[in-house]
Amino acid sequence: MRNKQVKIGFLFDCDGVLIDSEWAYSEIWSRINEEYPTGVDNFAQKIKGTTLSKILNENFPDDITRRKVTDRLNELEQQMKYEMTPGAAHILDSLHKENIPAVMVTSSNKLKLQHLRDELPEFLDFFSCVIDGDMVEKSKPDPEGYLKGAQYAGCLPKNCVVFEDSLQGVMAGKNSGSYVIGVAGTLPASDLQPYSDIVVHSLEDVNLPQLIEILENR
């Protein structure tokens, strides 16, 4: 029987966790890096989970280049097609039926999220709140986004679970004090394990009743 006196929350990264898009972003950022070279090895992989403002400020030296990179990113993002990852629809629907809040915590901006809504009209309706990259001052691995997510869910961070696929993301989840599930695929499980309580290969592997019990007893 559920301990409903303890409020729990589910906090999800978007790309690579709920939406099968990390492969596309790897191609987009590799393409941008060819057009506006950063000199950073494995650039597309290293910036995963990072807000656009941090990417621009740390890798592109002047305002003109930053504007060009932003315009190019927006252009390529608007061409993307989105599909949910295996198990995503089931777990989100199950949370909705259990009246458990789901919050998306993403580095994406509002323009990208509008395109996501256009592509998958009902997807964002699963969430009680979306914390996007424009709503935080500090990028992952700082826990700001997940602390805000827990606040919007109305529960303590320790009673939340964070689902992440990037190194920056699992670190942010761990830094927030939440229970962290690393979702392998974007990175191998061995990379995520040090900052995760468990690692799964997809959301299909999540034992939801068991996870709810863990969160309620933390």
Image (tube, grey):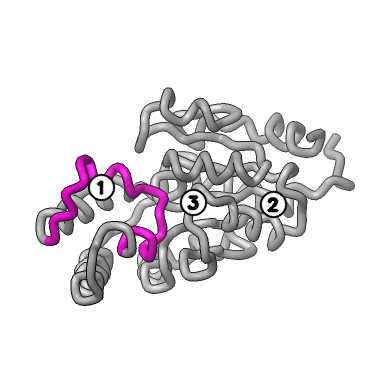
| Left or right of residue 5, residue 62 in this image | left
The quadrant holding residue 66 is bottom left
Check residue 140 in the rendering and tell me which mark sits there, or answer none: 3
Q: Nearer the viewer, residue 198 or 177?
A: 177
Q: At x 22% / y 41%, what residue is drawn?
A: 42
Pointer 2: residues within 10 angstroms few (<14), some, or many (20+)? few
Whether residue 75 appears in this view of the structure is no
Identified by mark 1, the residue type is: Ala
Q: Amino acid at mark 2?
A: Lys
Q: Earlier in the sequence, mark 3 or mark 2?
A: 2
Q: Disc 1 vs disc 2: which is toward the camera?
A: 1
For marks 1 and 3 on the same chain, the one whose residue lies earlier in the sequence: 1
Relative image position of residue 179 (x, y in whole percent): 65, 37
| Residue at mark 2 | 97
Give the magenta part as a residue range.
36-56
Q: Residue furthest toward the left?
A: 35
Which part of the image, by quadrant, shows the N terminus? top right
Q: Which residue is mark 1?
A: 44
Tag 1 secondary structure: helix
> In whole angstroms, how far apart are the C-alphas of marks 1 and 3?
16 Å
